[in-house]
Image (spheres, rainbow, N blue to C red):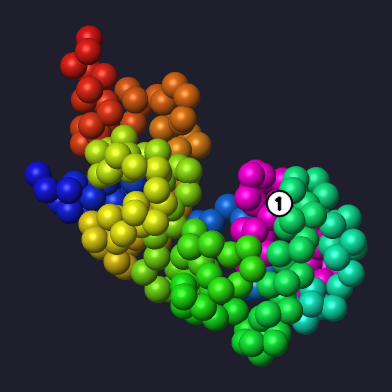
Amino acid sequence: MTDKEKAVIAVDLLEKEYPEAICSLIYTDAFQLLVATRLAAQCTDKRVNIVTPALFERFPDAQAFSQAEIGEIEELIKSCGLYKTKARDISAMAKMLCDEFGGTVPDSIGQLTKLPGIGRKTANLVVGDIYGKPAVVVDTHCIRITGRLGFHNTKDAAKIERILRALLPPERSNDFCHRLVLHGRAVCKAQSPKCDECCLKDICVHYSAKQNKH
C-alpha cells in the first residue's frame, strides 16, 4: 500500500469515527478566529473560549483592537498565559489588517503569515475554515498521529505540511486535521495511547511495532 492510499484510508476511518469535524474554538468571523488561535498558543481551547466572549464584546473587530490600549487587552486575556506577548501581537495584527488590508482578513497563507504572531498553522486554519480552501493544520496532535502512522519521522511542521499536502485529498484535508485533534485528545494521546481502541490501528506503524514486540 502506498502512503497516498493509506492516507485516504485514514481520512475515511476518522470521518466515520468523528462525523463532526469542527474547530473547538468559538468565533463568529475570520478576525475572531485569528485572535482566538493566537490566544490558544500554549493554552487550552477551553480556557480561550472562557476568555473571548468578554474580549470580543469589548473589542468586536480589527478597528476596535487597533485603537485599544495594550494594557486593557492584557487585562482581558491574562488567564491565557504569555499575555503580554499575545496582547502585543494582537494589537499589531489588528493595526496591520486595518492599514494594509482594509480591516479584512486576507484569504491566502502568504498574506496571513505576514501578520504579527501568525504562523502557518493559524494561516491554514483560517484559509480552511473561513475561506473553504484546501488546508493542512499541523498542530501537536497532527505531528504525533501522522508520525505514528508512518507518514514521516520529523517534528518539523513545515515539512509535515508539505508531506501531507501531497498525500491527502485536498478537499478533505482540513476536516482530517480537525479530526486528528479529536482523536489525539480521546485516543492517540501523547502518553499512553489507547492503541487497542484505535480505529487506525490496522494501518498504524506504531501499533504494528508494538505488536511485534510482544
* Residue ranking furthest to the left: 1
In this rendering, the answer to whether 77 lies above or below 128 is: above
Q: Quadrant of the N terminus?
A: top left
* Residue ranking furthest to the top: 214
Give how far across and how far down residue 85 sits, in percent: 74, 56
Q: Is residue 42 left or right of residue 138?
A: right
Q: Which element carries disc 1, helix, strand or loop?
A: helix
Which amino acid type corresponds to the residue marked 1 in the rendered image? Val
In this rendering, the answer to whether 157 lies above or below 134 is: above
**The residue stretch that appears in magenta:** 33-61
Is 213 colored magenta in this rendering?
no
Q: Nearer the viewer, residue 101 or 168?
A: 101
Give the crowd class for mark 1: few <14, some 14-19, many >=20 residues within 10 Å.
many
Q: Nearer the viewer, residue 89 or 203?
A: 89
Give how far across and how far down residue 122 sits, in percent: 54, 62
Give how far across and how far down residue 38 sits, in percent: 65, 58
Q: Chief secondary structure of the magenta span? A: helix
